Image (spheres, helix red, strand yellow):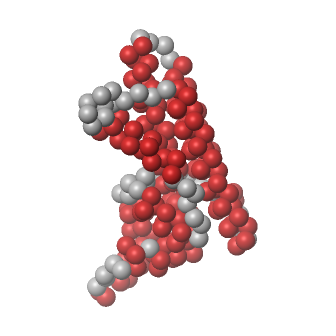
Amino acid sequence: EPLKRLRERLQQAQEVLSLEGSVETKGFAQLLVYSSIIGALEAFLYETAYFWINTDEKVLRDLVTGLPVFRQEKIAVADLYERHAGIKDHVKGHLQNLVWHRWDKVAPIFKHALSVQLPSTKDFQGPLLKRHDIVHRSGNDKNGSPVAVTTEEIGELCSKIEAFAKELDRQIDVRDSDLGFDALSADGPAPE
């Protein structure tokens, strides 16, 4: 489901490019689409992690025991039972507050929870900086110059995001088949 939703989001974003309007409006739409497709990648990563933590107790346990933020968390003995009962919600809360393009924070989640390596994120470094300027500087770079985005760039970035997501999904499928887990029969709704 997360890969399917990613594809739908990328398609919807690219369809915005076909809308009519002035040159300025079309340029603004390109900026919005560009930033949106990075958001679609982040949503894919979040939804994938959320699905597995919500579905497989072993994944939840491996994440809690392996990820330093949880492994090193101090808990009073008096709070132990309450924390144990709410551990899944505690982990989900952490995921909801994570910045999903912080590769140094995201890669360990997939490593510890699913025993998979995040595919290379090298191709997203430049686009993330460009997205930052679009979102946080209203489409201007640090020098105040307008950020330019072409439809070709958007298409290329969509292709790279889909290839990244397919590779991560493939690694998870290999892991699943090795463990005898059938994700399709366990698939559930998107996270809230």
Give the vertical position of 113 relative to 49 (above or below): below
Count of marks overlaid on the render:
0
Q: Position of residue 141 (x, y in %)?
A: 31, 34
Asked which quadrant contains residue 105, the reply is bottom left
Residue depicted at 47% across the width and 79% down the height = 65
Residue at the extreme bottom of the image, as rendered: 77
Q: Classify residue 110 as left or right of residue 90.
A: right
Q: Position of residue 77 (x, y in %)?
A: 31, 88
Question: Could you say which is closer to the camera, residue 66 or residue 61?
Answer: 66
Q: Position of residue 158 (x, y in %)?
A: 56, 38
Is residue 99 visible to us here? yes
Residue depicted at 45% across the width and 69% down the height = 88
Asked which quadrant contains residue 84, the reply is bottom left
Asked which quadrant contains residue 85, the reply is bottom left
Is residue 79 visible to us here? no
Residue depicted at 37% across the width and 73% down the height = 69
Residue depicted at 56% across the width and 52% down the height = 189
Question: Could you say which is closer to the camera, residue 49 or residue 124?
Answer: 124
Give the vertical position of 147 relative to 83 (above or below): above
Residue at the extreme top of the image, as rendered: 22
Question: Could you say which is closer to the camera, residue 165 or residue 90?
Answer: 165
Give the vertical position of 183 relative to 163 (above or below): below
